């Protein structure tokens, strides 16, 4: 599941898709639109391998609405060395509510593993939507691991193009393995309305959700975001040693979820992937695999 957004009266759902079969491989960003989150119209794929920085696959990422109501997509590409790197794409025509065509930046990749940053080149993927700090700079997190410690690597940027890795992660937890499809957002302490991803005040708590690659389930923590130190501090009972024993969005076969803020209706929408229990042979026989589900706040 990747990059949902609301733009000019349409909901856009981007998702991992193999145009050549019902099993994983040949990954592109499929694209569908809806007016009601129930009935969806498929469009041509939004992003597909075309640059050295994504020539071996366009993996998960997220969409962010930048200043001036301009959407941008950050996504993980697989380069010629099969390293996981982070790229950006923009709509070709902002006046098109369907956002049919996307243009990749010639500056890709924007973030990549190096000998200096010591990031694991095979465990560096799935950038989140961006949020603004008090200093006016953008932040995102990217899932990773070091040995068996799961990590939410934090990056900052003034312009959403030039990114600087923070010295410390937003959060990490020992023994949890690779953190895929991380998500980070505020929720009101009291009330049922959703709030903008950049909001931080005494009236909100923050949710950090991770998809544990080793467990194939989605887990989330509730806590406080210290935006002076750019650290997420879990509430009591959500300490790292308990991460696999705490809250899950849903049970059964459910994974790789993402949220976005629907500012038109002041609600946060969660979309996830139900990856079933079918065998590969069954998926090939029926011609499809996996379904999408959503929750509204």
Image (cartoon, rainbow, N blue to C red):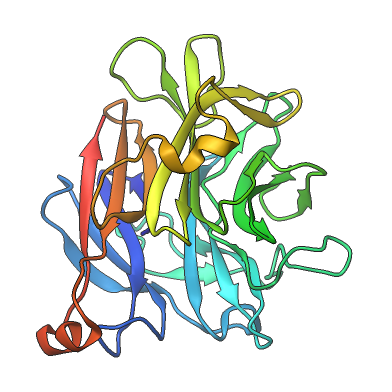
In the displayed structure, 89 sits above or below 190; it is: below
Q: Position of residue 77 (x, y in %)?
A: 57, 73
Q: Is residue 37 left or right of residue 193?
A: left
Of 99 and 194, which appears nearest the observer?
Answer: 194
Q: Quadrant of residue 200?
A: top right
For the N terminus, which image quadrant? bottom left
Q: Is residue 194 left or right of residue 80?
A: left
Residue shown at 64%/47% (left/top)?
Answer: 174
Q: Position of residue 116 (x, y in %)?
A: 89, 63
Residue shown at 31%/42% (left/top)?
Answer: 270
Q: Quadrant of residue 136?
A: top right
Of 26 and 47, which appears nearest the observer?
Answer: 26
- Residue 53 visible to an observer of this rendering: yes
- Residue 97 visible to an observer of this rendering: no
Residue shown at 54%/9% (left/top)?
Answer: 202
For the C terminus, which image quadrant? top left
In the displayed structure, 120 sits above or below 237; it is: below
In the displayed structure, 99 sits above or below 165; it is: below
Q: Is residue 159 left or right of residue 39?
A: right
Of 194 and 40, which appears nearest the observer?
Answer: 194
């Amino acid at each position: 599941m990747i990059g949902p957004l609301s733009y000019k009266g349409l909901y856009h759902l981007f998702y991992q898709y193999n145009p050549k079969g019902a099993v994983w491989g040949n990954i592109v960003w499929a694209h569908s639109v809806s007016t009601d989150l129930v009935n969806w119209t498929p469009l041509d794929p939004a992003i597909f391998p075309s640059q050295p920085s994504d020539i071996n696959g366009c993996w998960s990422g997220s969409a962010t609405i930048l200043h001036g109501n301009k959407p941008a997509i950050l996504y993980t590409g697989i380069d010629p060395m099969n390293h996981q790197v982070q790229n950006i794409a923009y709509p070709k025509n902002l006046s098109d509510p369907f956002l049919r065509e996307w243009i990749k930046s010639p500056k890709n990749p924007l973030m990549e593993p190096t000998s200096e940053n010591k990031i694991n080149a095979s465990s560096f993927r799935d950038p989140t939507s961006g949020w603004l700090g008090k200093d006016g700079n953008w932040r995102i997190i990217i899932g990773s691991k070091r040995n068996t410690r799961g990590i939410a690597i934090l990056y900052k940027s003034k312009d959403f193009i030039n990114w600087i890795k923070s010295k410390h992660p937003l959060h990490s937890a020992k023994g949890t393995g690779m953190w895929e499809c991380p998500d980070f957002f505020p929720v009101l302490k009291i009330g049922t309305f959703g709030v903008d991803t950049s909001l931080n005040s005494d009236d909100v708590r923050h949710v950090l959700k991770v998809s544990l690659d080793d467990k194939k389930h989605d887990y989330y923590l509730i806590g406080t975001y210290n935006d002076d130190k750019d650290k997420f501090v879990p509430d009591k009972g959500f300490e790292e040693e308990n991460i696999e024993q705490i809250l899950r969005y849903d049970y059964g076969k459910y994974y790789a979820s993402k949220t976005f803020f629907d500012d038109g209706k002041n609600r946060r929408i969660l979309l996830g992937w139900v990856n079933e229990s079918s065998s590969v042979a069954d998926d090939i026989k029926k011609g499809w695999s996996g379904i999408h589900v959503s929750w509204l706040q």
